[in-house]
Amino acid sequence: MRENVREYSGGELLKLSDIKAHPLVEGILFENDYVIIGAPPKIGKSIFVQQLTCSLSSGTPFLDTFSVPNPVKVWYFATEGKDEDTKDRLIRMSHALPIEPANIRLFCSAGFRFNTTIGEKTINNILNKYEKELPKVIIIDALYRAIRGSLKDDEVVNEFHEIVGHLADICDAAVVIVHHMKKPVYFENGAKQERSDDDIYGSTFLKASVDQLYWLDKCDKNPNDIILKCDTQRSGQAIEGLRLTLFEPDPLYFKIISVYTDEIHRITTVLAGHPEGLNLDLLMKATSIKRSTMFLALKELQDKGVIEKRGSPKHLLYALKRKS
């Protein structure tokens, strides 16, 4: 077991780890992140994180857009729903998405609470059993069934964070927690009150403790689509918003829908003046395009064969494709 406390001094104090700078999912999930994904009931948040699990396990782009540099092991704690329903979703996803089952370990229990004596004992047993196969990502779906006590109780929530944080430390893993949001509020005229990640249900320490808080909501323009937003983020590297549509029942998966004609023109114009290519940050600065839009526009340009990626994941450049 690793120690709870990490110590840095001397040269290590002012040096960042090259490994920790790498994303697990570009623009979405980074090394050792602590993330909450919130949404109202019946909007597809479990499908979303299960699709994320597929991409992480196989090392293939999430939502066919966001690069996954390497396949990683994922521990998925399903605390709600039937075992066969969870497995059935993964099977239907596998009909359209690459998945590596050997990299996924699914733990199902409707009565599993992390912040209990039995919960901690179960975690220790799992760690001992798979000490040579530890994950890089831990997913807990969903929070309300994974915690004993009131979600509005600060002490209960902080105890849960401590236990899960210790588990993440031992595994050197990122954590993704699926959670509910408060029900929407409607005015007398029928209009819906504007939502934000402040609508996440429970203690303020839920929002205060995470690196990113993503939330899903129905699209006002088309109720069949959903919007993914990220208002709270520490790194400034996460996407700000996406519009997704769900394909179901079989195969089952989310897909990004968007067209960015103006942004594509700006990107190709800038890259034409830099034949050697530009990294993402410089390209965003030169075009004044926000991160989430940039990912979508670059994906469209790559699909059309207009641009290409060059260099390593650490020093990735985007450039106009060389003419053969």
Image (cartoon, helix red, strand yellow):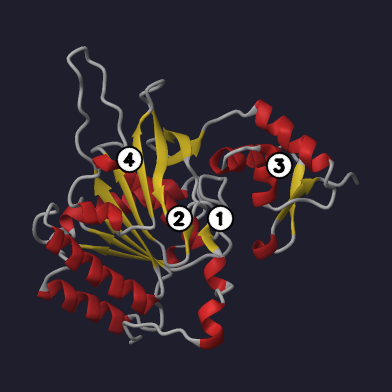
Q: Nearer the viewer, residue 74 or 176?
A: 176
**Which residue has dot 2 on it?**
54
Q: Secondary structure at mark 1?
A: loop
- Labels 3 and 1 touching (C-beta < 8 A): no
Mark 2 or mark 4, earlier in chain? 4
From the viewer's perspective, is the residue at label 4 or at label 3 nearer? 3
Q: Nearer the viewer, residue 315 or 177?
A: 315
Q: Secondary structure at mark 4?
A: loop
Q: Residues within 10 Å of mark 1 (few under 14, many from 20)?
A: many
Mark 4 or mark 3, earlier in chain? 4
From the viewer's perspective, is the residue at label 2 or at label 4 nearer? 4
317 to 184, vertically: above or below: below
Q: Nearer the viewer, residue 252 or 212?
A: 212
- Labels 1 and 4 touching (C-beta < 8 A): no
- Labels 3 and 2 touching (C-beta < 8 A): no
Q: Position of residue 77 (x, y in %)?
A: 27, 62
**Which residue has dot 4 on it?**
44
- Labels 2 and 1 touching (C-beta < 8 A): yes
Q: CA distance from mark 2 to mark 1?
A: 8 Å
Mark 3 or mark 2, earlier in chain? 2
Q: CA distance from mark 3 to mark 1?
A: 29 Å
**Which residue has dot 1 on it?**
60
Q: Position of residue 36 (x, y in %)?
A: 32, 53
**Which residue has dot 3 on it?**
286
Q: CA distance from mark 2 to mark 4?
A: 15 Å
Query: Which of the image's four quarters has the N terminus?
Result: bottom left
- What amino acid is at disc 3? Ala
- What amino acid is at disc 1? Thr
